[in-house]
Image (cartoon, rainbow, N blue to C red):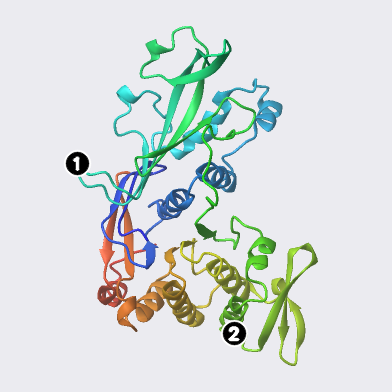
Amino acid sequence: MLRSLEIQNYRNLRHLTIEKLGRVNLLVGKNNTGKTSVLEAVAIYASLYNESITIKSLLQRRGEYYTNRIREVLTGEKVTSENNLASLSSLYTDYIPKYFSSNNQGSDIYIGEQRIKDQHNPKSLAISFRKAYQTLRNDGSGREIIEYVTAEKEEDIGSREFRYEIHFWRNYLTQSIYSLNSDRLFNEPTIQMPNGALDQFQYVDSKNQSQNSVEALYSKIALSDKEDIIVNALKIIEPQTERFSLIENSKIIIKLTHRGIRNLSSMGDGVSRVFSIILAMVNCEGAYLLIDEFENGLHYSVQEKLWEIIFYLAERLNIQVFATTHSNDTIKAFGEVAKVKPEYNDAQLIKLRNVKGEISAVLFSTQDVEIATETDYLDLR
């Protein structure tokens, strides 16, 4: 679990520091204050050795990713690594990554716990772009092997063949290197990934889409007590819910007491929202749950009950939750639940502010939430 959060040079977050995080964290603020960017950054951080897959997914979700083949058809451009870099540039605050370590101080993307001067943070991820030039090495048996050496400055490359690379530094120790000179955004990494290195998060966006298919999520919890958790959550909105099942074409059906079987899609936005959030949550035990625009599809009268389930499951399944909202009703419901039990009191309400392009955070304790909403201090719209 992250105890604090520092994000540098990711999208509109030039340098954001959140000094304290809880098990459940609610991000609020006006448009263009970086709420979704924070969720994305945590998703990338949580993607242990799968950072490239998550980045590609996020680019696709925002419409910022084009395969080189599509780009060539649309623009007539020759397929080159510059096409990949054009997609990736949107990740950077200034849209222009720097390639050499000698002039790269402070320009890499950093995501992790708040850094302490002169100390290496064990929970961190740094992302940098580099140029690497080609060399030949004799393997001792007379064969020459092509290798790539990271250039420190442009002069190191000269007239030699080179490629663009993206480097991921995990906890300042483990490095993954990907070549961008390919017809895909990311090629296979040049180091072997540890066995069992999987994404450690679930991301539910404002349209109830997650990075995993419904079939994949359902298959992991079928015939387990986690099905009962989802059924109980659905009863918040539809008390007659008995059970649910997955049928062909990824459709979810729900059995209702005395009313037969219904398609989930026909039961309204609220039921679909609760189902998406809780299905994702029971699939990320020991990891991170990210929810964008929590209130979407939810009537204010059910939000407190949903927060109760989220707080309970976060403790039971050891999940750290990050959610965003524009809604005062959502904040009030969050605050009411956060003060119910002592173990919930570390929940954090985090207001993001944009002052002349610089995003900063203001923290509210659970005791301050009610005062903040009643005085309209949060000013979300």
> In percent of the image, x 65 and y 34: which residue is there?
67
Q: Position of residue 155 (x, y in %)?
A: 38, 10
The Cα–Cα distance between marks 1 and 2, rounded to whole angstroms, is 52 Å
Q: Quadrant of the N terminus?
A: bottom left
Using residue 122 as the reference point, say whether residue 40 is left or right of it.
right
The residue sitting at 34% across, 50% down in the picture is: 123
Q: Residues within 10 Å of mark 2 (few under 14, many from 20)?
A: some
**Amino acid, disc 2:** Lys
Q: Position of residue 284 (x, y in %)?
A: 52, 64
Element class at badge 2: loop
Residues 377 and 110: in front is 110
Query: Which label belongs to residue 118?
Result: 1
**Does residue 321 sit above or below 303 in this rendering?**
above
Determine which of the numbered discs, if any, sits on residue 332 in the image: none
> Which residue does the image show at 58% across and 83% down from the upper left?
232
- Residue 335 vs 208, above or below: the answer is below
Q: Earlier in the sequence, mark 1 or mark 2?
A: 1
Front residue of 273/345: it is 345
Q: Residue shown at 53%/42% (left/top)? A: 193
Quarter of the view holding residue 233: bottom right
Residue 325 locus on image (x, y percent)? 43, 65
The residue identified by callout 2 is: 235
Q: Relative to residue 138, is residue 223 depicted above or below?
A: below
Q: Percent x, y for residue 194? A: 51, 45
Which amino acid type is shown beneath numbered disc 1? Asp
